[in-house]
Image (tube, rainbow, N blue to C red):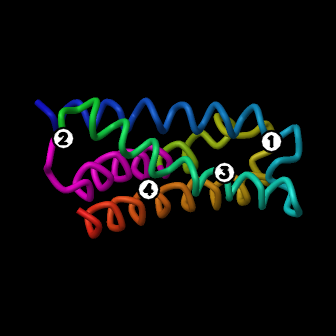
Amino acid sequence: MRTLSLILLGAVLWFLAAVFLRLAMPWGLFGGGYPTAILFGITALLAPVLLSAVHRLTAGGEAPRLPTAAIICLVGALLGSVAMTWSPELYAANPARLVAGAAWLLFGLGALLTSAMLQDRTR
């Protein structure tokens, strides 16, 4: 049951990230420079908070957090790759501008997995 909850939360988080990309692209948040660096920094800071919330919400208890992160990242990566291949307009009106947004998505997945490894190591 917990695995199913993590899969569903992974899908919801992917969808929220896709909506964020769609809304943030026109504002130039993925055009490089300071706005993009700040966005990546905020993402790195929010990853452990998000991971802890998902772990608690799915009754992870004292279990390691890496499986929690792995499942939600797996779902996000699968859905993201399918959407970027067959429906890139979901992310951006101009799919040619999607590279920076895709990099942010990959960074977010890496930040979640890194957070899980660090949190597990300190437990």
Real-space Cα distance between discs 4 and 3? 13 Å
Task: Evaluate if marks 4 and 3 touch, with contact meaning CB atoms under 8 Å apart.
Answer: no
Report the amino acid beneath label 4. Leu
Which residue is identified by label 2? Answer: 60
108 lies left or right of 66: right
Residue drawn where x is 17% and y is 38% of the image: 3
Q: Is residue 35 above or below residue 110?
A: above
- Please state the horizontal and vertical placement of residue 31, each as a whole percent of the image: 86, 56
Report the amino acid beneath label 3. Ile
Residue drawn where x is 38% and y is 52% of the image: 73
- In the rendered structure, which segment of residues is drawn in magenta? 61-81
Look at the image and say whether residue 49 sits in the magenta stretch: no
Which residue is identified by label 4? Answer: 112
Instruction: First in sequence, mark 1 or 2: give its number.
Output: 1
In this orientation, which residue lies closer to the viewer: 109 or 87?
A: 109
Instruction: First in sequence, mark 2 or 4: give its number.
Output: 2
115 lies left or right of 70: right
Q: Secondary structure at mark 4?
A: helix
Real-space Cα distance between discs 3 and 1? 17 Å
